[in-house]
């Protein structure tokens, strides 16, 4: 009989009952998503749709939906969903609260760090001039605006598209002398990519000083750069006029939220370039009241948490995985922590014969296996991120990865 159940089985490509319990994996399996939904008697949307959830053993990647919101954040979202409020009033009040929490002059909840980059740039270009807001991204028309953004060559990155959305042109420099020569009456802003601080010839503090010296606003994209928690105020205190963070990475707020922090006049101008104002570059970057309140709740929770204990937990998870896979003959595993972005313990796994068993084949086997686990390959290595896992998933990942590597290398 071709009933709904059979149809769903066909969609997911998996038999219905076999995924309940997953006995081979022991106690940890009880934490898997489909089991939870079934246990609560709720509707299992992902199974219904044939979308397969997985253990996130990678990190805060947008493609993998990045982070899970804690229950306190979901409570805030649920709370906000039951009332009407004026969007602008809520943005202003939440902005004030967030600013005081992170010791910034002002703050705005944006729809992600990418939107913070666009709105911050728009703010610099338009100020509170409505004609300019309407003209954006046309910088040359009646409401003539500055059009150049200075950036170090080593700081060019994919996300600078969010800045270019405002119609500006990137002017690349390498040395301090280059930068000072590049400043001219058409210079709107100086953009800094925090993760590449060490790669540039001009580092953060000097960059800020140069901005101040020439009267050009400086903007630091630190989207993925908490932890450490102190980074939430480090760069505004250093003197950057604007700083962007993602809301849905380490802070674990809504994935579609972000923070723009900085100078009061610029934050006010950024807000004017966003909803509810319709004729603006930011109109497509709506943040709803649920996300705004959820972002505040997530930030408060993040600031209160025991960061040292969390760090120990991440280290323990990484060590569990490292130890497990290192038992496979020929496999080398080490724990490492990226210096700036995603500054939490990861595991790097390599083996000698990575032509016969390629890292990407292991990634596929892990994703297609049971349970599904998302890890990443980087050149000749596998990289496992532990911070977005749920409790005890590290044990599942440790065991599965050891199995997949042992089997794959036994065949070769
Ligand atoms: C993730 C990221 C962004 C985009 O952040 P969203 O919150 O997803 O919009 C921008 N810049 C950098 C450096 C990032 O890592």
Image: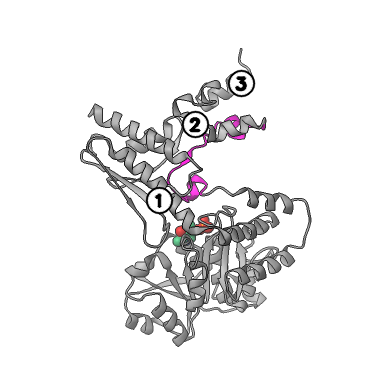
Q: CA distance from mark 3 to mark 2?
A: 27 Å
Cα–Cα span, label 1 and label 3: 42 Å
Q: Residue 105 location in percent, x, y? A: 60, 76
Decide if residue 142 is in sight here. no
Q: Is residue 364 above or below residue 15?
A: below
Among the two numbered marks 2 and 1 on one chain, the one whose residue lies closer to the N terminus: 2
Circle nearer the N terminus (1, 3): 3
In-image side of 70 versus 193 (left or right): right
Left or right relative to 82: residue 91: left
The residue at the point 60 percent across, 30 percent down is 48
Residue 411 visible to the viewer: yes
Q: Front-most of 67 and 75?
A: 75
Q: Which residue is mark 2?
A: 27
Mark 3 burial class by Cα count in 10 Å: few <14, some 14-19, many 20+? few
Is residue 55 on the magenta stretch?
A: yes
Element assignment for label 2: helix
Q: Which residue is mark 1?
A: 315
Q: Depth check: give the residue in front, 78 or 281.
A: 78
Q: Position of residue 299 (x, y in %)?
A: 59, 60
Q: Residue 177 vs residue 369: left or right?
A: left
Which residue was labeled with disc 3? 5
Q: Which residues are magenta?
A: 42-66
Tag 3 and tag 2, C-beta contact below 8 Å: no
- The secondary element bearing badge 3 is classed as helix
* Of pointers 3 and 2, the one earlier in the residue sequence: 3
What secondary structure prevails in the magenta region? loop
Mark 2 crowd level (few <14, some 14–19, many ≥20, 10 Å Cα): few
């Amino acid at each position: 009989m071709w009933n709904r159940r059979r149809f769903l089985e066909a969609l997911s490509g998996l038999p219905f009952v076999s995924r309940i319990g997953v006995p081979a994996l022991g106690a940890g399996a009880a934490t898997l998503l489909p089991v939870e939904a079934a246990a609560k008697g709720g509707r299992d949307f992902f199974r219904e749709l044939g979308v397969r959830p997985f253990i996130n053993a990678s990190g805060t990647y947008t493609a993998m939906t990045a982070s899970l919101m804690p229950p306190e954040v979901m409570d805030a979202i649920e709370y906000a969903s039951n009332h009407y409020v004026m969007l602008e009033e809520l943005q202003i009040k939440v902005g004030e609260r967030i600013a005081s929490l992170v010791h910034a002059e002002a703050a705005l909840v944006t729809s992600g760090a990418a939107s913070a980059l666009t709105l911050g740039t728009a703010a610099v270009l338009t100020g509170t001039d409505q004609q300019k807001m309407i003209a954006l991204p046309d910088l040359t028309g009646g409401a003539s605006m500055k059009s150049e953004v200075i950036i170090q060559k080593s700081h060019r990155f994919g996300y600078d598209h969010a800045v270019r959305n405002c119609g500006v042109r990137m002017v690349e420099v390498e040395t301090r002398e280059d930068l000072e020569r590049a400043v001219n009456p058409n210079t709107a802003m100086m953009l800094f990519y925090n993760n590449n601080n060490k790669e540039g010839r001009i580092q953060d503090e000097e960059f800020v000083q140069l901005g101040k010296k020439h009267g050009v606003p400086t903007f630091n994209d630190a989207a993925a750069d908490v932890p450490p928690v102190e980074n939430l105020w480090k760069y505004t205190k250093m003197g950057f006029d604007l700083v962007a963070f993602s809301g849905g990475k380490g802070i674990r707020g809504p994935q579609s939220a972000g923070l723009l922090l900085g100078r009061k006049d610029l934050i006010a101008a950024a807000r004017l370039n966003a909803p509810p104002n319709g004729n603006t570059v930011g109109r497509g970057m709506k943040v709803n009241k649920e996300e705004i309140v959820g972002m505040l709740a997530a930030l408060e929770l993040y600031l209160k948490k025991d960061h040292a204990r969390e760090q120990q937990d991440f280290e323990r998870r990484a060590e569990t995985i490292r130890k497990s896979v290192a038992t496979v003959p020929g496999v080398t595993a080490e724990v490492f922590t990226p210096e700036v972005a995603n500054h939490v313990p990861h595991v790097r796994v390599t083996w000698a014969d990575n032509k016969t068993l390629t890292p990407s084949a292991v990634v596929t086997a892990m994703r297609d296996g049971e349970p599904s686990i998302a890890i990443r390959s980087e050149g000749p290595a596998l990289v496992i991120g532990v911070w977005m896992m749920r409790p005890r998933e590290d044990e599942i990942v440790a065991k599965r990865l050891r199995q997949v590597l042992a089997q794959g290398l036994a065949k070769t």
